[in-house]
Amino acid sequence: MRYYLGTDKGLLRKNNEDSVYFDENHRIFIIADGMGGHNAGEVASKMAVESFVDFLESKNEFSAVEMLNAISYCNNFVYEASLKNKDYKGMGTTFTATHIDTDTVKIIHVGDTRAYRITEKDIVQITEDHTLVEQLQRNGNIKKDEALNHPQNHILIKALGTKDTIIPAIYSEKFDHGDYLIMTSDGVTDLINDEELKNIVNSIQQPENIVKKIIETANVKGGKDNISIICVKFDVERELKR
């Protein structure tokens, strides 16, 4: 397995509210995209990542049950912080974490940060966006092409740390030799569509260069938000390598 990750504040934002994390020993990858004023988004995403990892490491177990417990713990951690500090009032974050066990990827997810599986022929969005527009589309109120430029396409219906309880989505997916796991914040997916993403991955094939190209492309297209990307390539090697 080979991997690379990167984050960039983009061209319009003053600071980077995304947090990107990896733990090579435990094979955990996380992207959290924070929100809130007074730099609270940056605080929320960092706090969520750190508390999630601290919880799992304290248990030294990375099962789906413990990942769910970790989400509840870090949600409460962020929510309590938002109540205690007026500058952090209303802060929250999207949160997508993966744990890789050989060819199985467990994903726990809140918000609109995404995880994809990309093969030579296909791209599949594994996670489902927790947004108002996605909900409208699922319910048949709008069509897919209407969702792309809908004026409310960034309204989250679920985010970590904004309420005292959270029910995340959890997925378990098998990856084959040659497949790619791609995780992105919406600073990527707002500007680069799925077909473009697939073409970049399959034309470059090396995780480091893929990540750099995606960040470059998002900035060329306007860089209107923070840009974060994780790329993991599954191959015959036994260890994760940068």
Image (cartoon, rainbow, N blue to C red):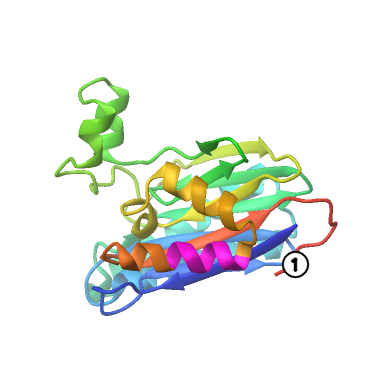
Quick check: is 88 in the magenta stretch? no
* Tally of numbered discs: 1
Residue in the image at 62% along x and 62% along y = 207
User: Which secondary structure class fits the magenta region best?
Assistant: helix
| Residue 84 position within the rendered picture, expressed as x and y whole percent measured from the top left | 30, 72
Q: Which amino acid does label 1 sit on?
A: Lys
State the residue lying farthest toward the front: 203
Q: What stretch is highlighted in magenta?
A: 208-215
Snapshot quadrant of residue 121:
top right
Snapshot quadrant of residue 27:
bottom right
Left or right placement of residue 192 versus residue 64 in this view: left
The residue singled out by tag 1 in the image is 241
State the residue lying farthest toward the top: 140
Closest to the observer: 26 or 197? 197
State the residue lying farthest toward the left: 151
**Is residue 54 visible in this depiction of the protein?**
no
Residue in the image at 64% along x and 37% along y = 172
Residue in the image at 58% along x and 45% along y = 107
Q: Could you tell me which quadrant the N terminus lies in?
A: bottom right
